[in-house]
Amino acid sequence: MGSILKIALRNLTRYKRRTALTSLLIVLGVALVVIFSGLAGSFKSMMIGIITDSSLGHMQIHKRGYVSSIDTTPLNMNLKAKGYQQMADILDQTEGVAAYAPRLKFGAVLSNYLESTNIRLSAIDPEKEVAVCTALPGRIAEGAAPGEPLLGRGQVVIPQKVATSLKMKPGDSVVLVATNKDGSVNGMEFEVAGIIEDIMGPGGKDAYMHIEDARSLLRTEPGEVTEIVIRAESFDKLDALAARLTRQIDAITNQQGKPALELHTWAKLSPFANIASMIDLMLITVKIVMVAIVLISVLNVMLMSVFERVREIGTIAAMGTQPSTIMGMFVAEGVLLGILGTALGLLVGVAGLFVFKVSGVTFSFARMDNLVLQPEINVPELALVVAIVLVASALAALQPAWKASRMEPVDALGHV
């Protein structure tokens, strides 16, 4: 094997210009894949982190059928106190659950006594909410200082857009008017505790209040919740944790004997999941293009190599060299070409990612400005790129190598 590799390396150095040009194509293909994968992967991870850590959580549990009518925030599909406690017991005993928090979701009218507007309210337990949405405090533009509770009883955090349009600031008094599930209307006065930044576009009208105040406003039963938000200990193991919880949740049935609850991961609840899927599709497309570059480059070189060395092949075949050895020589030559291009391509790609990271490339997404892209080196992704290139190089060299190994010595020696 060692002698075959030496011969293959010697043959590559015999045609330095051709080897250099072919390697350059592979280098460019590999480098572009590494840079694009790093940047796209960084953007995807960053946006998923912002969405899940700021508002959505990793998973949510609702009464079955709630998500299909989530736009109307129906109050008649809330979980009773008994159902919430049953789920809390399961979550406390499930390995991989880092934290969970209850929420009440409903629509209301907010008024500053001069003007009014519709808003969507998430009634939360402040301490538990921060445990599942760790980036939520960072969205408070005005109000609570770092380390202080987001809000207390009798307080509300309003979205930036609403605060601007109604000219409101922390400390102002507002009235919230909401319709109960039985159709009656109730209103209560609150103090603006803070103003929260919107993260998903100018239409954001999501406000926060204490869950006990929401129960008083809506006159719900004690302990009633709309959803349970869950944070996993490891995001990479989210699907496995969701599958385990789903099996346990399905055991909780209603009076008809059907599952009463349903669990959805962030990907089922956020439109950004479609963008994430498009990013994955683009990565696959880029890799296919890279494979095409490698196949065409190596195949072209190996076909030329076989054509130029027909008499040499006939000589070693006449000396008794086995067809498998001849074939191995050319396959090794193609693989070495792939190794050379891959090694240099990885160096160029990693250097490119380092440049992007040091330069601190910023971008905007929805209403989020000055987001800094921090590309990371994904070792499994690099290993996959290496494997793809080497396999493609071997496959590209296979046909010319097979042709060389099947040459008749007499015909090859007589080749002009």
Image (cartoon, rainbow, N blue to C red):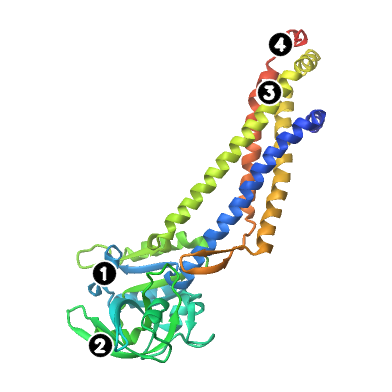
Check disc 3 and report the residue beneath it: 303
Cα–Cα gap, marks 2 and 1:
20 Å
For marks 4 and 1, give the one nearer the viewer: 1
N-terminal-most mark, 3 or 4: 3
State which quadrant residue 195 falls in. Answer: bottom left
- The three-letter amino acid code for the residue at tag 3 is Leu
Q: Which mark is drawn over residue 144?
A: none
Split into 4 quadrants, where in the image is the C terminus?
top right
Could you tell me which secondary element the residue under label 1 belongs to?
Answer: helix
Q: Nearer the viewer, mark 4 or mark 2?
A: 2
Q: Looking at the image, is 11 positioned above or below residue 106? A: above
* Crowdedness near tag 2: few (<14), some (14–19) or many (≥20) residues, C-alpha within 10 Å: some
Residue under label 2, please give it: 187
Q: Nearer the viewer, residue 109 or 128?
A: 109
Category of crowding for the residue at label 4, using alpha-carbon neighbours closer than 10 angstroms: few (below 14), some (14–19), many (at least 20)? few
Q: Which residue is mark 4?
A: 408
x 17%, y 79%: residue: 182
| CA distance separating discs 3 and 2 | 82 Å
Of the image marks 4 and 2, the number of the one nearer the N terminus: 2
Q: Earlier in the sequence, mark 1 or mark 3?
A: 1
Q: Position of residue 341 (x, y in %)?
A: 71, 40
Tell me the tag on residue 72.
1
Alpha-carbon span between mark 4 and mark 2: 96 Å
Mark 2 or mark 1: whose residue is earlier in sequence: 1
- Disc 1 marks a residue whose amino acid type is Thr
**Dot 1, how many residues are within 10 Å of its Cα: few (below 14), some (14-19), or many (20+)?**
few
